[in-house]
Image: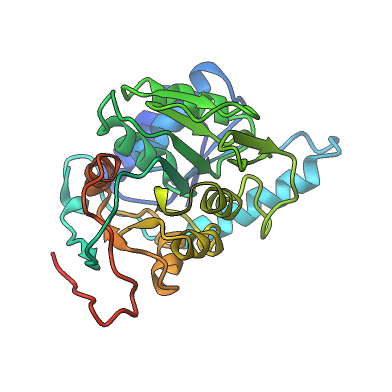
């Protein structure tokens, strides 16, 4: 395991990460002292290059927050040390050669009206790729929960916006979910929708330890949009979002899970698939195309995993 700053003599953290992932793939944690400007951009680019996560530097030992942040940093280091990383840069496209697994059920009525996405470890780079591959006139609002160090969400929104044709912003309470716009859950707040289908950003309790929580988002959109919602569960550790995906499936919504081959950590998607909540398992490079089809009302609805009509296909 390597813990690395973004500012170093001779080579910044982005360039160093890129070199390491070519020559000797190793789990890397970016440890940043700043959550603004150039530091955020370098940190997020390092994630795109193959680093696993970014964490803030713990406060000085005299700070009342030192013990909590120290414990969080050590816990993340222990967890990331077990992640199996692969060679990056110079082998472009290798990890997208996976075969989609799809369950086919006829009769997808109409287009989805909202997309909800959730990610954790490896998520910023996955989100960047998906959003960059969506057209600038993509007609459906996208709500996103991304587990990331506090203070980095605004920088993440700017970083994503710079690489896609959509508007990307941190969500605010009571605003309407607009088309061609991506709304990120703010730091330490839950994101969802109200019954009148406006956004809700609220200081609600954590769900299974997470705020923002993918389960909170998914359960909320299931209540607000029913079968008109599509959910995407991306790379990440743990099981946040799985209970919420169950609510989406019961409401008749459509669920996409990222596949193992293209996930940095096949945790959240794996639990969703094992629970029977995924309609389709796709490589990262196929997800944007599927979302375009869903937004246009294409027949992409899949059968339940326990349906006698199930068919697996490439």
Pick out the residue farthest to the bottom: 308
Residue found 31% across the figure and 38% down from its top: 130
Residue found 55% across the figure and 64% down from its top: 243
Mark count: 0
Left or right: 76 as drawn, with respect to 248: right
**Residue 205 percent coordinates (x, y):** 75, 50
Residue 92 figure quarter? top left
Pick out the residue farthest to the left: 314
- Position above or below: 237 against 205: below
**Residue 68 percent coordinates (x, y):** 77, 47
**Residue 66 percent coordinates (x, y):** 79, 41
Residue 23 figure quarter? top left
Residue 13 shows in the view: no
Residue found 46% across the figure and 21% down from its top: 158
Front residue of 184 and 4: 184
Residue 227 shows in the view: yes
Left or right: 95 as drawn, with respect to 59: left
Pick out the residue farthest to the top: 37
Front residue of 108 and 71: 108
């Amino acid at each position: 395991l390597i813990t690395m700053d973004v500012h170093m003599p001779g080579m910044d953290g982005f360039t160093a990460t890129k070199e390491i992932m070519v020559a000797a793939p190793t789990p890397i944690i970016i440890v940043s002292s700043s959550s603004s400007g150039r530091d955020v951009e370098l940190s997020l680019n390092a994630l795109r290059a193959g680093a696993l996560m970014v964490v803030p530097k713990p406060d000085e030992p005299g700070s009342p927050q030192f013990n909590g942040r120290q414990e969080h940093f050590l816990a993340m280091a222990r967890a990331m040390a077990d992640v199996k990383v692969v060679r990056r840069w110079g082998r472009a496209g290798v990890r997208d050669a996976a075969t989609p697994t799809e369950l086919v059920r006829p009769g997808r009525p109409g287009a989805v009206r909202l997309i909800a996405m959730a990610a954790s470890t490896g998520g910023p780079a996955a989100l960047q790729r998906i959003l960059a591959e969506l057209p600038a006139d993509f007609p459906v609002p996208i709500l996103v929960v991304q587990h990331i160090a506090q203070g980095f969400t605004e920088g993440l929104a700017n970083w994503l916006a710079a690489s896609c044709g959509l508007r990307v912003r941190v969500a605010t309470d009571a605003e309407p979910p607009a088309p061609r716009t991506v709304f990120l859950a703010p730091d330490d707040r839950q994101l969802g929708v109200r019954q009148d289908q406006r956004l809700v950003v609220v200081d609600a309790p954590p769900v299974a330890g997470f705020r923002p929580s993918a389960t909170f988002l998914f359960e909320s959109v299931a209540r607000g949009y029913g079968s008109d919602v599509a959910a995407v569960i991306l790379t990440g550790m743990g099981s946040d979002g799985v209970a919420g995906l169950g609510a989406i499936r019961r409401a008749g919504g459509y669920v996409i899970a990222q596949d193992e081959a293209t996930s940095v950590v096949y945790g959240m998607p794996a639990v969703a698939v094992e629970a029977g909540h995924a309609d389709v398992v796709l490589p990262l490079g196929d997800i944007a195309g599927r979302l375009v089809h869903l937004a246009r009302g294409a027949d992409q609805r899949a059968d339940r995993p326990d349906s006698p009509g199930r068919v697996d296909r490439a």
